Image (cartoon, rainbow, N blue to C red):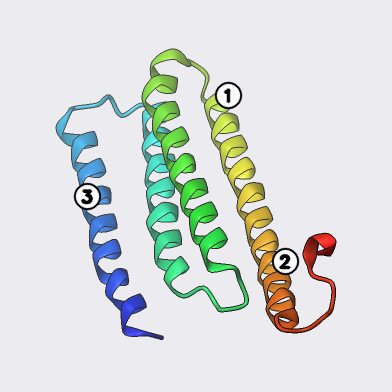
Amino acid sequence: MSDQRRTGVLPTGVAGIIVVVFTVAAFFLLSIETIMLNVLALAFLLLSEFVLFGGLIGLRYAGRQHSSVFLNTGITTTLSLYFAATLITSIIGVAVMERTKIFVLIEIAIIALCAIIAIAILTFSLSIRRQNANDAAKVGTNEPKRGGF
């Protein structure tokens, strides 16, 4: 692994630890009532933080078989939107909802939707990388390129 990739892992991990510690500290220092719904909201929020920062660190180890620009942009956006959706439902949802089962169902739906999007991005990044490799092999030849020109 290159030095450039290694340098981003430690700061990302430290930032993740700081965010997780802040979230737990805020939960207890703000004297939030420890009912089941609030504890579940905290658990889902912590899960989204681990997934966000774990995914960002995982992108540093992504192989060369993927289109790196598409993969990095797509996965980073998906993870960020997942965290934002979980944060919003944890803050607003707990205040509005009274039923724990509905809250858990909404969180599971958010996880499923983001997982589907992430899998699609991984699949498309492989396809884009293969297509780019095929196009690069055609440079300097008389073979038809993409688009027929």
Residue toward you, 116 or 74: 74
Number of residues whose C-alpha sits closer than 10 Å to that of mark 1, classed few (under 14), some (14–19) or many (20 or more):
few
- The image quadrant that residue 57 belongs to is bottom left
Name the residue tied to disc 2. Answer: 127
- Is residue 116 found left or right of 32 in the rendered image? right
Residue projecting furthest to the left: 29
Whichever of labels 2 and 3 marks the residue nearer the N terminus, that label is 3
Q: Amino acid at mark 2?
A: Ser
- Above-or-below relation of 129 to 102: below
Q: Disc 2 and disc 3: Cα gap in Å?
A: 39 Å
Q: Amino acid at mark 1?
A: Ile
Q: Disc 3 and disc 1: Cα gap in Å?
A: 27 Å
Q: Residue at x 24, y 57 (%)?
A: 15
Residue toward you, 85 or 132: 132
Q: Are marks 1 and 2 in contact (CB under 8 Å)?
A: no
Name the residue tied to disc 3. Answer: 21
Q: Secondary structure at mark 1?
A: helix
Number of residues whose C-alpha sits closer than 10 Å to that of mark 2, classed few (under 14), some (14–19) or many (20 or more):
some
3 vs 1, front mark: 3
Q: Residue at x 26, y 70 (%)?
A: 10
Q: Disc 1 and disc 2: Cα gap in Å?
A: 38 Å
The percent position of residue 101, horizontal first and vertical second, equals 57, 26
The percent position of residue 3, horizontal first and vertical second, equals 31, 83
Whichever of labels 3 and 1 marks the residue nearer the N terminus, that label is 3
Whichever of labels 1 and 2 marks the residue nearer the N terminus, that label is 1
Q: Quadrant of the N terminus?
A: bottom left
The percent position of residue 78, horizontal first and vertical second, equals 52, 47
Q: Amino acid at mark 3?
A: Val
1 vs 2, front mark: 2
The percent position of residue 103, horizontal first and vertical second, equals 52, 27
Name the residue tied to disc 1. Answer: 102
Q: Secondary structure at mark 3?
A: helix
